[in-house]
Image (spheres, grey):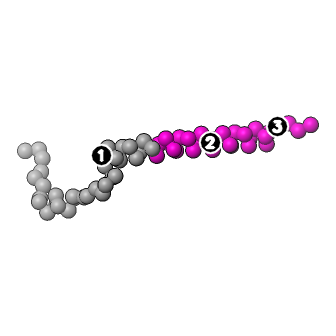
Amino acid sequence: MFWKRRDPAEKERRRYYLLPGMGGRAYRRKQRVILKYSIVFGLIISGLLAVLLYYLNRPRF
């Protein structure tokens, strides 16, 4: 009553396929690894920038 019936041709058109590693447990594991590496990389870069800014703004006598 409040919903439309989907045409079978539209359903076929909207279908997509996932390759291995693009969904499910493997995808979540892959995303977790990417998140860990991005956090580590971000901490390293921010630390290097902090050291650089510290040395650039030190008073020189």
Residue 41 part of the magenta segment: yes
For mark 3, does the 10 Å Cα neighbourhood hold few (<14), some (14 to 19), or many (20 or more) residues? few
Name the mark nearer the viewer: 3 or 2: 2
Instruction: Estimate how packed mark 2 is, as few (under 14), some (14 to 19) or many (20 or more) residues with alpha carbons within 10 Å.
Output: few
Q: Amino acid at mark 1?
A: Gly
Q: Circle 1 sits on which residue?
A: 24
Q: How many marks?
A: 3
Element marked by disc 3 = loop
Q: CA distance from mark 3 to mark 2?
A: 21 Å
* Residue of label 3: 58
Farthest residue in the left direction? 1
Foreground disc of the pair 1, 3:
1
Residue at left offset 66%, top offset 39%: 47
Which sits in the foreground, 59 or 23?
A: 23
User: In the displayed structure, does residue 54 sit left or right of residue 60?
Assistant: left
Q: Dot 1, how many residues are within 10 Å of its Cα: few (below 14), some (14-19), or many (20+)?
A: few
Residue under numbered circle 2: 44
Q: Relative to 13, say whether 56 is above or below.
A: above
Note whether 43 is above or below 22 in the view shown. Answer: above
Amino acid type for the residue under numbered disc 2: Ile
Query: Which one is nearer the viewer's eye here, 7 or 46?
Result: 46
The magenta span reads: 34-61
Quadrant location of the C terminus in the rendered image: top right
Magenta: main secondary structure equals helix
Residue at 20% from the left image edge and 62% from the top image edge: 13
Query: How many angstroms separate mark 1 from mark 2 (CA)?
Result: 31 Å
Secondary structure of the residue carrying numbered label 2 = helix
* Relative height, residue 8 to residue 51 (above, below): below
Q: Amino acid at mark 3?
A: Arg
Where residue 59 appears, as percent x and y from the top left, is 85, 36
